[in-house]
Image (cartoon, coloured by chain):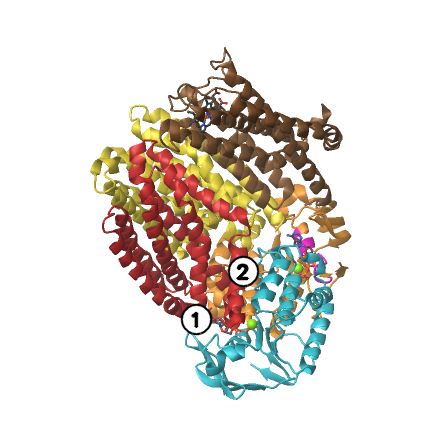
Chain colours: A cyan, B orange, C brown, D red, E yellow
Amino acid sequence: MIIVKDLSVERLDKKIFENINLSLTSGNITILRGKNGSGKSTLLKTILHIIEPSFGTIYWKGKLLKKNLYDFYDNVTYIADKTSSLTKLTVKDNINIWSRIFFSNINNSQLETALKTLKLENYLNKKVGTLSLGETKKLEFLRLIIENKKVWILDEPLSNLDEDSVQLIKQTFEDHCSQGGSIIFSSHQNPGIYVTEEVQL
Amino acid sequence: MIIVKDLSVERLDKKIFENINLSLTSGNITILRGKNGSGKSTLLKTILHIIEPSFGTIYWKGKLLKKNLYDFYDNVTYIADKTSSLTKLTVKDNINIWSRIFFSNINNSQLETALKTLKLENYLNKKVGTLSLGETKKLEFLRLIIENKKVWILDEPLSNLDEDSVQLIKQTFEDHCSQGGSIIFSSHQNPGIYVTEEVQL
Amino acid sequence: MKFLVNPAKFNEVTDYIFKPVLILSVLLFALGLLFSFYLSPDDYQQGSTVRIMYVHVPSAWLALLTYATMTLYSILALAFRIPFGFIFNTAVAPIGAVFTLICIISGSLWGKPMWGTWWVWDARLTSVAILFIIYLIIMFMNLSFENRIVREKVVAVFILVGSVNLPIVKFSVDWWNTLHQPATISKLSKPSIDPSMMIPLIIMTFAFMMIGLAIAILRIKTEIISRKTNLS
Amino acid sequence: MIKFLIKIIFFYYREYKLNLSGFQDILTNIIFFFVSIFIFIFSIGPDKDTISVVGVGILWTLLLLSSTLSLRKFYQDDFENGNLVIMHLNGFSFGFIAILKTLSNFLFVQIPFLLSIPIACILLNIANDKIIYLITSFGISSFILSCLGSISSSMNLMNQRNFLLGSLIVMVFSIPIIIFSVGIINMEESFNSLINILFGILLIVFAINPWASGLCLKLSLENK
Amino acid sequence: MIKFLIKIIFFYYREYKLNLSGFQDILTNIIFFFVSIFIFIFSIGPDKDTISVVGVGILWTLLLLSSTLSLRKFYQDDFENGNLVIMHLNGFSFGFIAILKTLSNFLFVQIPFLLSIPIACILLNIANDKIIYLITSFGISSFILSCLGSISSSMNLMNQRNFLLGSLIVMVFSIPIIIFSVGIINMEESFNSLINILFGILLIVFAINPWASGLCLKLSLENK
Ligand code: HEM
Ligand SMILES: Nc1ncnc2c1ncn2[C@@H]1O[C@H](COP(=O)(O)OP(=O)(O)OP(=O)(O)O)[C@@H](O)[C@H]1O
Ligand SMILES: Nc1ncnc2c1ncn2[C@@H]1O[C@H](COP(=O)(O)OP(=O)(O)OP(=O)(O)O)[C@@H](O)[C@H]1O
Ligand SMILES: [Mg+2]
Ligand SMILES: [Mg+2]
């Protein structure tokens, strides 16, 4: 679905990376690997067209992504490397806002099981600002389920999580792929997730 | 040097952990392990006397830590789980502020080698806000060297770092311990750092 | 008198007196309305607008009285470590605010025919407005500060500091030469008011007091319960 | 299409939650204005005539203050915590986000203030028949201020020196508008034609806003 | 000891760096200040006498309002990014941090204002010989405001919801101070003795400040 061709990105006239090629079809998982500062996050943002590449093109469903942007956005969930929940609101408020703004079609019981598997069910009325680092991170993953889109673009989803949660994520990834979804994520760890393509930056 | 006895902490009247014992002597490394939300960060903050425990006592050099607080603070560096560099200033400004405010006794060439080993030497005039996640994290470690204290209290120092940097940290830990320093840190990963004590929360 | 400082005792005693208080407040209020509308004369200067007085003056007195008791309880709570004081303050502040609001609104309604404007910046009116704002701030603090233990202390200190305003409200008419009526009824010497106006005024004052008391009892009870169940 | 409308509604639900997590916040806003009026009165003195002369000026200053106060919150928080990106990925173009945000600033910051004008007029001894003029001109100019605020605070996000200047220029821009609208109130005969001019300015700024703010948002996210 | 002094100096170096990178904020404040003065002049009309009567009052209110503007920055940023903890671990007790921060607020927020007072006096037709009184009384009172601001904004750290509450509290407390200092300027004979009283208030607030703010900082960090 996504094809990235000869992508190069410059930032402040400094080359971040050059000639990156990758393609993501449904059911596939792509992992981005590379040192700190090698441009993984930058690449993900470029794919999302938040950053404009200096060379190269990106295709979405065969068309230029630029021309087809909002269709692409309708199919993609992005989780950045920093949490984006609203720290001043409670977990519940955050979930409410997301599920409403994303026009989510999942029902309450699905949400509850998701909360339970993530072990967040007791924190519903707690301010996000007072959660632990890993809990905040897990809360972010709820968006994957709420948005319920095909392509997941995740920036370091595995950091700050405990062993159990990492396994859970792994499981979720596999389920998503078997349902025809596709994932591209960056990580420094190697938790034994089966990936179809590894891109070295 | 640090002895923690029967420590229990409550937050909003909810027990976070109970009866934790640990002792840290010079040359030792203690690792805190536990699930997300098990209270690792809370324990570290309690040891730093930022959070008051509901039960239990902490001793520093044989005396009650409470009574001896500023002597303790003179010997400890704390790196929290979130970065605390000033994102609006450049790397250089941050380093300047730190080295001056901590009245650092390391000289410029030491600093430069440190910057080089951390591969941050090219970013001196860059705003911290525009660094990559791992680079920001590494910048934080510079404080260990600038402050040059005996006890290091580190919250998830290994997350978001690439393989090389983790090795570097490992090396730094070993050097520090061989010079009589002591370290207590929390982590979800197991990078093969030799630890003297493992506390399960 | 222990029920005035002890939550458990308070619950016990108020279980007995709540119903009488409620009935009394309804009766007194009805009686007061009857008196103030039918059984009291028009003022020879002010005509029938004088009847606003039967709302205005009692509510003004009670606004002040409520704050005064809150100040007392703050001292009890802070100096003698009696937590009931915090409970009382949290529960009662909105009642005081409402009384103050009634006082301001009725005063303005009275002021339009008497002085020609709704509002003047004389010392009495200004200080009452500040009293109202102080009440509101107390309420806001109670609603938005997260840590209860800290919040109650902060609020109690704030109440104490704010109590400076009370004598200003009370004596501003004597200290400064203002538009507002100087003390005519609440003078220590002989009140210079006709008994036919005095009677409805007193009845209405007691009616207001009883209503306030009834609501206060309810609110304090709920506050006690909410503290038991939700410890934060 | 309906889906999109619902999205917009929930955009405002979110803004509401963020800006005023309840009725008491609106009340606090309003009280804040009244206390500011108090402060003015205390510092100027209680003389009726003076007050009614400076009254309009006081109201204007407060309006300006409230918009300056809110400038920082305009995009900054959403920019920093990444919510701007999420909204964009959710199908709102940057220009459209700018429009929504401007309206939300108007709704949650300026409107509470507009609502308290009638009472403020009583306190400040402003003649009753002027109130309607006041509210009209205030309504329009506060909307202009919201638009200008949107532009300047989105410029602010870029955090580069030349844009720093830009946002100051926008501040300076608002001066003639304010001075103009202050003048309006004292010229009752030609009120209508003057209001039309103000309205014209509003239209221009409103048209520029999504374009300018959208661009700034895009660029600042790119350089984040 | 000397080490400690040097630490303090670099504390201010840090504040300077931080505030100056928010140079725009300072400039915005000053522009706000002058724009408001213009608003007044325009809404009052060019009548010199009225202007000079209300001039002092206007200056006062603007000073107060603009210091409320800066309240948010007082501790919030350092609280959120963890620098408060680092400073504390670096040997500053919370009370001492409060003192330093209060001084820094005075230096970087209030002083720019004090500097612009002479110009404002010219605009507002305030007699030259009054300027010195004005600046003295403003200096002291703005320091009082800094202390009050420190207390209320440290308190507000525990209240993440209702930001304006802190400003409200400061404003209510500053009412007596305003009444007092506006009075001062019009009573030139007894100026010295009145200034002494103002100074007394300053001392009291300054003494309470480290204790109260320090406690609030500690508690809010504990519950962060
Ligand atoms: C908004 C405007 C007003 C406010 C805030 C206000 C406030 C108060 C307050 C606080 C008191 C109680 C004072 C005490 O206990 O000594 C009071 C009493 C009183 N007020 Fe007003 N007032 C207002 C307008 C008026 C007007 C327009 C009148 C009539 C011309 C009026 C007549 C009185 C009288 C007769 C008393 C009883 C005085 C006494 O003997 O204690 N008030 N008012
Ligand atoms: N806003 C920006 N402006 C300029 N340069 C930037 C900006 N953001 C990142 N960079 C630089 O681009 C390079 C790549 O950054 P990026 O965040 O993509 O790295 P990364 O591979 O995600 O690293 P990490 O593993 O540490 O997250 C880094 O050297 C960084 O300093
Ligand atoms: N400020 C706070 N107020 C109330 N509860 C809190 C606060 N901070 C943390 N908690 C709760 O305390 C528990 C422990 O948090 P802590 O941050 O210590 O966990 P942790 O072990 O560090 O987890 P992680 O591995 O995710 O970082 C969590 O359940 C969290 O929700
Ligand atoms: Mg990255
Ligand atoms: Mg943690």
Query: Horizontal and vertical percent for residue E44?
Result: 26, 41
Which residue occupies 42% across, 52% down? D110
Which residue occupies 38% across, 27% down? C114
Rendered view: D75 above or below B58 = below
- Asked whether disc 2 touches disc 1, contact meaning CB atoms under 8 Å apart, the reply is no
Rendered view: D71 above or below C161 = below
The verdict on label 2 being within 8 Å of ligand 3 is no
Magenta residues span: B34-45
Q: Which mark is residue D174?
A: none
Q: Which chain carries label 1?
A: D
Q: Which amino acid does label 2 sit on?
A: Arg
Mark 2 lies on a secondary structure that is helix
Query: Horizontal and vertical percent for residue A141?
Result: 64, 68
Q: Quarter for ligand 4?
A: bottom right
Q: Mark 2 lies on which chain?
A: D
Residue placed under numbered mark 2 in the picture: D14
